[in-house]
Image (tube, rainbow, N blue to C red):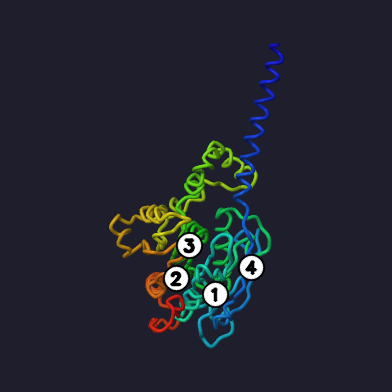
Amino acid sequence: MGVGFIKTTFTLLGLAGGSYVGISSAMAAGLTRTTRVRSEETPESIGLDYRDVSFTSRGGDARLSGWIITPESGSDSPQTTARGTSWVIMVHGDNTNRSDAKTGMLGIARALNRRGFGILMFDLRGRGDSPAAMSSSGYFERLDLQGASDYLVSKGADRSRIGVLGFALGGAVALMAGSNPNNFGAVVSDSSFADLSLVLRNEMTGIKRPLAMWFTGMEFMAKSIYGIDIKDVSPARAITRSDTPVLVIHGEDDEVIPVEHARLLGRAIGASFDEIESGEETVWIVPGAGHTGSFRTQPKLYIEKLVKFYEAHLGAPHNSHLSLPSTSGEPESQVD
């Protein structure tokens, strides 16, 4: 009887251990999955000239597809137009692509380009038209953004005059990649999370609460199987040790990433409570805006804030004398 009890105990422990490993592994695998959505529109559909480009992530493990939109300069050479130009690299969120209509990425690109900025839009690894590569909830995607910066520099751009505008996951990627001042001159993050661990733990509520017991196992499996260090996907911690100028934008009614994440990012930057709530300097919380909906909610002010921020830190772009046109008589989302 004693031997049978011991065998039964070890069998149950083995089953429990196998179950823990299996569930932890499945949860870790979820960090690498994304939905591929291809672009249905191009810059040409809104009246912009562009070129298809491709480049590799820093480290070369992913091939990336993008569009480059140069400011009007009378030159067709990307090598020529890159020099002396202030650039903005736009980074989309998860489960979408470089033309994300929900965010209004093409509209934002047009507005910035008409104010003299060069624009580079690209699909993150495993998304849009970028060939298959494992996604990683931001961990490896930061190398994609650094590769985009390297591409512009290879065409003659001054790295200190390259800014970033990232949305949702792209915002987190921008903050992490931009934490090194040698990568970018300025970073704008729209609807980013402050810390991936916080997001994942907050999702483990209600009927998902039991999953919390596998969180440590998920962290271990993510790192050992996929090379993803969940603890390191922390934009808030990254910008705490960064001198790169940062502007955080977040919708007050964000139903995906609660606005508290913007406040955490603001405090990581060093903003006071009054500065965060007033939206004057480093954090702009947009009333009535949902997830990545700030441009659609206040398009004119959105572009004004971007232009002011980028001009202050990247330098005045080509055609910087152009004034912001009135939006009277046209939908607010159509700001040019």
Residue 84 position, x and y percent, is 48, 78
Of residues 35 and 207, the one nearer the viewer is 207
Viewed as shown, does residue 31 lie left or right of 304?
right
Q: Earlier in the sequence, mark 2 or mark 4?
A: 4
Q: How many marks?
A: 4
Kind of residue sitting beneath label 2:
Arg
Q: Earlier in the sequence, mark 3 or mark 2?
A: 3
Q: Which residue is mark 4?
A: 38
In this view, the residue farthest toward the top is 1
Mark nearest the camera among 2 and 4 is 2
- Please tell me in which quadrant of the rendered image residue 249 appears: bottom left
Residue 232 position, x and y percent, is 51, 48
Q: The N terminus appears in which quarter of the rendering?
A: top right
Q: Vertically, is 266 above or below 75?
A: above
Q: CA distance from mark 1 to mark 3?
A: 16 Å
Q: CA distance from mark 4 to mark 3?
A: 32 Å
Q: CA distance from mark 3 to mark 2?
A: 32 Å
Q: Vertically, is 287 above or below 214?
A: below
Q: Which residue is mark 1?
A: 156
- Please tell me in which quadrant of the rendered image residue 115 appears: bottom left
- What residue appears at the point 36 percent right and 61 percent down from the top-left corner? 283
In this view, the residue farthest toward the bottom is 74
Of residues 194 and 4, the one nearer the viewer is 4
Q: CA distance from mark 2 to mark 1?
A: 34 Å
Is the residue under label 1 in contact with that under label 4 (CB below 8 Å)? no
Kind of residue sitting beneath label 3:
Asn
In this view, the residue farthest toward the front is 207
Q: Which residue is mark 3?
A: 182
Viewed as shown, does residue 283 lie left or right of 222?
left
Q: The C terminus appears in which quarter of the rendering?
A: bottom left
Q: Which residue is mark 2?
A: 296
